[in-house]
Image (tube, rainbow, N blue to C red):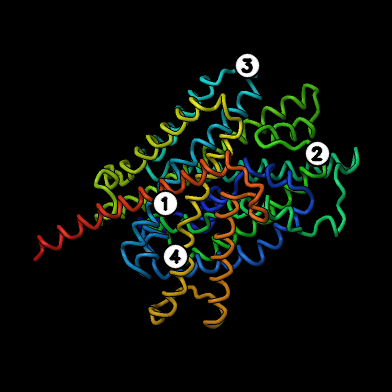
Amino acid sequence: MSNETQGKMGVMSIALFTLCAVLVVDTLTASASIGVSSIGWWVVMLIIFVIPYGFITSELSTAYPGDGGIYDWVKEAFNFKWAVRTTWFYWINVGLWMPAVYIMFAGMFAELFMPDLSLWGQIAICIVLTWFTVWICNVSADIGVWVTNIGAILKILVIGTLGVGGFVYAMKHGVANEFTFSAMMPTLDSAVAFLPAIVFNLMGFELVATMTKEMKDVRDMPKAVFLSIGITAFLYIFGTVGILMALPVESIGLVAGLIDTFKTLFGNGPFGTAMVYFFGICALLTLIGNMVSWTMGSSRAAAEAAQEGELPAPVAKMSDKGSPVGANNITGAVSTVVILSYALFAQGNDDLFWSIFAFSSCIFLLPYLFMFPAYLKLRVVDGERERPFKVPGGLGAQVVMSTVCFLVILQAVVLFIFPEALDLTVADWSYTAPVLIGVIVMILMGEWILLGALKRKNQQLEQES
């Protein structure tokens, strides 16, 4: 092994990084709470969305390697205006999403160890974890990759245990829900509630494209992407089936659901209690791994954009070891502000946790509305470029794949904002209005950032002339 490739990411390391980014333990119980029909939706979404998405990601990341990832692809296809918007949404959503993840962490931690922990005690945990995440990402990419690899292994352990435990529990006590073919078929009613969550759960396979400098060989990307897709698909379905075998649908909760499932599987004896603590701690650690992988990837893309003058200069600041400390620190600051805002309003609104999650998920999904059209345009206008991996099929097949992926993302954004999209006369504006206003504010902030980028670009052109 040469000195250049020693310590770099191989296929398994890339797959684990991707797995840690995509596999989300904390929303597994949310999908299981839809019922047995969720299994049908997993299968449908994997066939019509995830496999095309994996193909497209593999082609783009090998044909256009670079630290910018999705930002590079949109910039190459359209212009720097759309690249700025893409990077803004892709980066800032992590600072908005981190509070939701760590609010869930604090709730699960309190349920496991400190049932009487006050709201401000939970807020303190959230803020400490935010800056711990930033510190890991600032230290070096090597440590961050180690954290994400461990996080991926723990996710496999936790979800695998849910699956096996569910089957064992069902053999002893009977199945908690009816698993017939008709019950597993996806229905439109469940789709409205479920599809945004399932789409969110399956996003992130392109994140590892921001780590190309850390890879032994960028041509390993397709193998790693599809290895992680295969493992992800199996684990999501296996874990969902396990939970539904052990718990009746009506008793599966959002925050408490995971711990409740382990309590059901292992019982209340000394051994069972020890197992609940062990797997509960593993689940908590996966939340940290998730935020490290997303902060690493999105901050690198943002730093590259800032170095091009397309985001404000502080975002471009890099450490001596090449970590994007400016973008990481701003992510931490945004997360802290959102967490403190949550503390002020939480006592009056139990649903604010889900509002923060839905709001950040909308911002997170917006860049993908640019990515799939970018792929199609690059195939048309830059078809001569060497593509180490090329999606099979003619242009018609590429149009169909890109369009389906685009529409899947679009419906998820709409349903996150309007869960009652099939009947807007019953819209819950106490939920919808804050989410919608938050999305509009972030879009307007992006346009303000874009005006600054245009101004810097014009100044640069004047200096050059």
Secondary structure beneath label 2: loop
Q: Is residue 353 above or below residue 401?
A: above
Name the disc covering residue 61, or none: 4
Callout 4 amino acid: Ser
* Residues at circles 2 and 1 in contact by the CB criterion of under 8 Å: no
Q: Give the residue pinned by disc 3.
A: 116
Q: CA distance from mark 2 to mark 1?
A: 37 Å
Q: Is residue 235 left or right of residue 446?
A: right
Report x, y in % for residue 404. 59, 69
Callout 3 amino acid: Asp
Callout 2 amino acid: Leu
Residue depicted at 61% across the width and 23% down the height: 110
Please tell me in which quadrant of the rendered image residue 195 appears. Answer: bottom right
Please state which of the two labelled residues, at mark 2 or mark 1, is closer to the viewer. 1
Q: Of the residues under marks 1 and 3, which one precedes in the sequence?
A: 1
Q: Of the residues under marks 3 and 2, which one precedes in the sequence?
A: 3
* Residues at circles 3 and 2 in contact by the CB criterion of under 8 Å: no
Q: CA distance from mark 3 to mark 2?
A: 26 Å
Mark 3, Cα crowd under 10 Å, few <14 / some 14-19 / many 20+, is few
Callout 1 amino acid: Phe
Q: Give the residue pinned by disc 1.
A: 89
Q: Is residue 432 above or below residue 332?
A: below
Q: Give the residue pinned by disc 2.
A: 247
Name the disc covering residue 221, or none: none
Mark 2, Cα crowd under 10 Å, few <14 / some 14-19 / many 20+, is many
Report x, y in % for residue 62. 44, 68
Residue depicted at 90% across the width and 38% down the height: 172
